[in-house]
Image (cartoon, grey):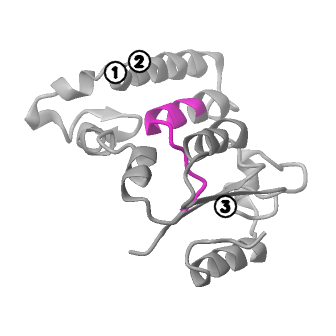
Amino acid sequence: YAGIVLLSTSPRPYYEVIYDQRINYGLVDRSDEEIYYLVSRTDTERKFLEDGEYLEIKEEDITKDIIFGRPTAFWLDFLQIDCAEYLKEVQKPVLILQGDTDYMIKKDVDFAAWQEEMAEESYATLKSYEGLSFFFTESKGIFAGHYKEFDRPARVSETVIEDIGNWILNEGTLAE
């Protein structure tokens, strides 16, 4: 491959992203009892992954034990990958794009982490789009920046599509 395009991603461990999503948005419209249960379960699952306890699961249970909605087998494989380190190792052109109203992968947390990780890497191009969501659609109306905005039909921004195409045509560079 000649390059990599990353859309709405984070260099943080995936369980941290899921944790934030559950705590910040997964408790909406829940009863007090549900909130208590979900927060407790979410804290337990995060600690299980953070502390490496998933590494001690018996082979016969790696598809049965579910953490953050995924079997332990997923985490055994997925947590071996450090995306930022991988990009630094292969040094292929990479385009990292982010919608600034994305509530799932946050600009001030996740995109800022990419900016910090890739600050010295000349092969990395990062761009954030004002007013675009997780899906790079226009974020507007009463549900802007809210999970309910996913319920309305929308099209990916033509600017994003053009930027990706231009980045590919220009062999990993994006004209400002």
Quote the CA–CA distance across marks 1 and 2.
6 Å
Let me know if residue 14 is in the magenta part: yes
Q: Look at 26% across and 37% down and name the residue there.
A: 72
> Where is residue 173, by image quadrant?
bottom right
Instruction: Report whether 86 appears left or right of 96.
Output: left
Image location (x, y in percent) of residue 62 = 18, 37
For mark 3, what is the residue? Answer: 135
N-term-proximal mark, 3 vs 2: 2
N-term-proximal mark, 1 vs 3: 1
Amino acid carrying label 2: it is: Thr
For mark 1, what is the residue? Answer: 48
Magenta segment: 6-20
Q: Look at 34% across and 21% down and name the residue there.
A: 48
Q: Look at 64% across and 16% down and name the residue there.
A: 32
Image location (x, y in percent) of residue 38 = 52, 23
Q: Secondary structure at mark 1?
A: helix
> Where is residue 6, by image quadrant?
bottom right
Q: Are marks 3 and 2 in contact (CB under 8 Å)?
A: no
Q: Quadrant of the N terminus?
A: bottom left
Q: Neighbour class for label 3 at 10 Å: few (<14), some, many (≥20)?
A: some
Image location (x, y in percent) of residue 21 = 59, 36
For mark 2, what is the residue? Answer: 44
* 38 is higher (above) or lower (below) than 173: above
85 or 31, nearer to the observer:
85
Quote the CA–CA distance across marks 1 and 3.
30 Å
Amino acid carrying label 1: it is: Phe
Quote the CA–CA distance across marks 3 and 2.
30 Å
Instruction: Determine if residue 113 is in view.
Output: yes
2 or 96, nearer to the observer:
2
